Amino acid sequence: MEAEDDSQTPESAPVIAAVELGRWFRHDVKEPIEHIVGGRKRLKVISLLACVLALDAADKATIGAVAAQLEHDLHIGNVEVGLLVTVSTAIGAFATLPFGVLVDRMHRGRLLVIGIGLWSLAMIASGAAISYPMMLVCRLGLGAVVAMASPAIASLVGDFFHPAERARIYSYILAGELIGVAFGFLISGNVAAIASWRVPFFILAGIGLVLAVVIARKLPEPERGGQGRMEDETQDGDEVETHPVDEIVDERGIDPRQGLVLKEDPGKMSLWHAVRYVLSIPTYRVLIIASALGYFYFTGLRTFAIVYMREHFELEQATASSVTVAVGVGAIAGVLVTGWAADRMIDHGHLRGRIVAGAAAYFVATLGLAGGLLAPSLIFAAPFFFVAAGGLGGANPAVDSARLDIMHSRLWGRAEGVRSTLLYAFQAAAPPLFGWISGVFGGGSTGAGRSPAGAGSGHGLDMAFLLMLVALAAAGFVMLRAMQTYPRDVATAIASEHHAPGKNRKKRARPPAAR
């Protein structure tokens, strides 16, 4: 008995706690999530792709979280802080199209490993920068993940997962982007407050290097054209049906645009030919504009959210970070709900379900932000901001899955490159423009050398966020224009898959309804 009592020493308590925590995570967290996403293999792929988006989002959010320290140490203002986000995004805008070509022709996992490795080195250099010009130059290398991530993830999602569940799958992956934002706001902001603004950059660089190694070892390369789809391991898989989009198109006799039905192998298209073809699809043009406008606003908001919370509601750094993250949970909820709803509408015969869900999310975000920005106190503003975050996040899985619906699988990488070029151009313009408007209306930091105490005054950012709501509302109205063009463009993509040379898609199994 004494031996048993002696075994329960204080030193063993942490070990026992760690073992129990591991058991809890495995049985109460991991296994339910595996069931939701359809099995362990699917969870692994979703998690890795989500982590790629989380890295870039965490970096951009970190800039916003440590903006006050950067302004003080580097003697800069809001415009200069915004440019730190802009330079990496601008490089992504220039590089994403050629990377899209590589995504359509090379091993996508290896490309991601190279991009994340370069990104991590640039993060280390950013943390070590001793002046603003040096940091600005160092951040040019961060465009590697920006340029690589979107085309590679779009192509992999299309090849790994069934069309009927793409909005739901995208919602899980995009949740990683939002978790990255939360990490940047909460962890990086608090670490910077305790130690230095440099430490978060070194932490993110270390995480990036680990992720590159994991992707190199664990991310499989699926067969092109949707032939490498991962079946739902949690289902019996006895019943195989036609994908509901095919059913709807066939039942309603929707005719493709004959002039856009591909007869040649898209994989052999020249870059210029591919770009012209992608931009000739009406719905794709609409989705490019809508997503660019939505991300334009999101980028400005993400960059200055912490500054706004601190100045407008007179909060401390840690409190402002925590409140912003709490409000941002609404974005994760919105991503998951909208992704589920978009797929359910299609499963019930509403072919335009993803278009409707995306437009509704943009309108919800616009109204929620307007209410929050005009509210008299944080108590009244927080519920509006929570709803708005749900709309901002919720638009993306619907838009992203709709883009795959209307494009031949061998063009997914280049098509995403075309979209990302405009999207990143809008994102690059957002931070300095929001910073400039805040300076004009708030009298704060519009240039280097201004006092950080006046940086991003609450009133100035109020006006910037309110004025730029025009872009967010416009995204919703633009999205509605796709209601007319989307059905025929879906039919065109289906016809192109069956007529273009090369491997066609296998019979598409219909997965069970989203849980």
Image: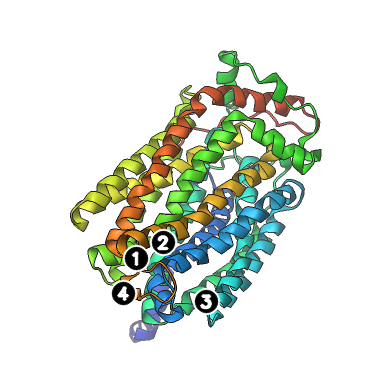
Mark positioned earlier in the residue sequence (4 or 3) = 3
**Position of 2 relative to 365 (above/below):** below
Between residue 95 and residue 511, name the one nearer to us.
Answer: 95
Residue at 32% in and 65% down:
443
Residue at 43% in and 81% down:
73
- What amino acid type should be assigned to the residue bearing mark 3? Tyr
For residue 515, say whether it is visible. no
Between residue 105 and residue 416, name the one nearer to us.
Answer: 416
Q: How is the image coloured?
A: rainbow
For residue 52, say whether it is visible. yes
Q: Secondary structure at mark 3?
A: helix
- Which disc is residue 453 wearing? 4
Is disc 1 in contact with disc 2, using a CB cutoff of under 8 Å? yes
Residue at 50% in and 42% down:
291
Q: Secondary structure at mark 1?
A: loop
Q: Which residue is mark 1?
A: 456
Mark positioned earlier in the residue sequence (2 or 4) = 2
- What amino acid type should be assigned to the residue bearing mark 4? Ala
Figure quadrant of residue 284: top right
